Image (tube, helix red, strand yellow):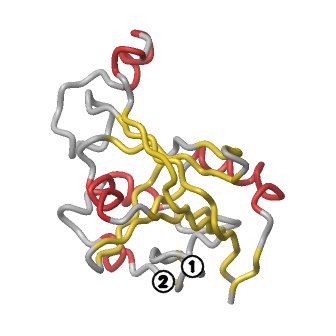
Amino acid sequence: MKKEIQVFDYASEIMKAVKTGVLLTTKSDDKVNSMTISWGTLGIEWGKPIFTVFVRENRFTKEQLEKNPEFTINIPMGEFNKKILGFCGTKSGHNIDKISELNLTLESPDKISVPAIKELPLTLECKVVYKQEQDRNEICEETKKVFYPQDVDSSYHGANKDFHTAYYGEIVSAYIVE
């Protein structure tokens, strides 16, 4: 069962959760994948509620988003298994089926093709309305040193020289899975 919500009534909870980690879930070719993110913005653009995610160039999630420009943001509420965020933040969907490994419960979406995840019940269903690759020449040197310091393989889960694409997702449905 789902309880429909007004997304901005939960803005504070959403942004606090993003700081510590939420799941960005994608689906393409019948494969569902979740990646932990701690970067994201909630706002209004073009008169629409938007959640913007930032995905490194060579992540499996980017490959999924390019095939199917829809995603869900799955946000914990109350007690939950924090191992979910650790696992989804360090393993690649290229190599492993995170959903089955973690035995996560997929919930049918309302308006898009990407499911919600019951274990992180506050869900934003998003359709990409704009995307933009970062211009590495416009990022200040201090930020590059902190967030893009290592020239390591892009499958590495930490900071590397693999820049991001911003995906602006119009929030087309918001609810709590009960």
Amino acid bearing label 2:
Thr
Residue nearest the viewer, comparing 155 with 26: 26
Alpha-carbon distance for marks 2 and 1? 5 Å
**Which residue occupies 60% across, 57% down?**
170
For numbered disc 2, what is the local secondary structure?
loop
Q: Quadrant of the N terminus?
A: bottom right
Is 155 placed left or right of 3 in the picture?
A: left
x and y percentages locating residue 7 in the rendered image: 75, 60
Q: How many marks?
A: 2
Seen in the picture, residue 7 relative to 133 is either above or below; the reply is below
Q: Quadrant of the C terminus?
A: bottom right
**Which residue occupies 52% across, 41% down?**
39
**First in residue order: circle 2 vs circle 1:** 2
Seen in the picture, residue 90 relative to 127 is either above or below; the reply is above
x and y percentages locating residue 136 in the rendered image: 34, 21
Question: Label 2: which residue?
Answer: 105
Verify CB contact (< 8 Å) between mark 2 and mark 1: yes
Taking the view exactly as shown, the residue that stands out farthest to the right is 9
**Which residue occupies 55% across, 61% down?**
73
Amino acid bearing label 1:
Lys
For numbered disc 1, what is the local secondary structure?
loop
**Which residue occupies 36% across, 75% down?**
99
x and y percentages locating residue 157 in the rendered image: 30, 44
x and y percentages locating residue 163 in the rendered image: 32, 32
Taking the view exactly as shown, the residue that stands out farthest to the bottom is 1
Residue 118's label in the rendered image is 1
Is 52 placed left or right of 78 in the picture?
A: left
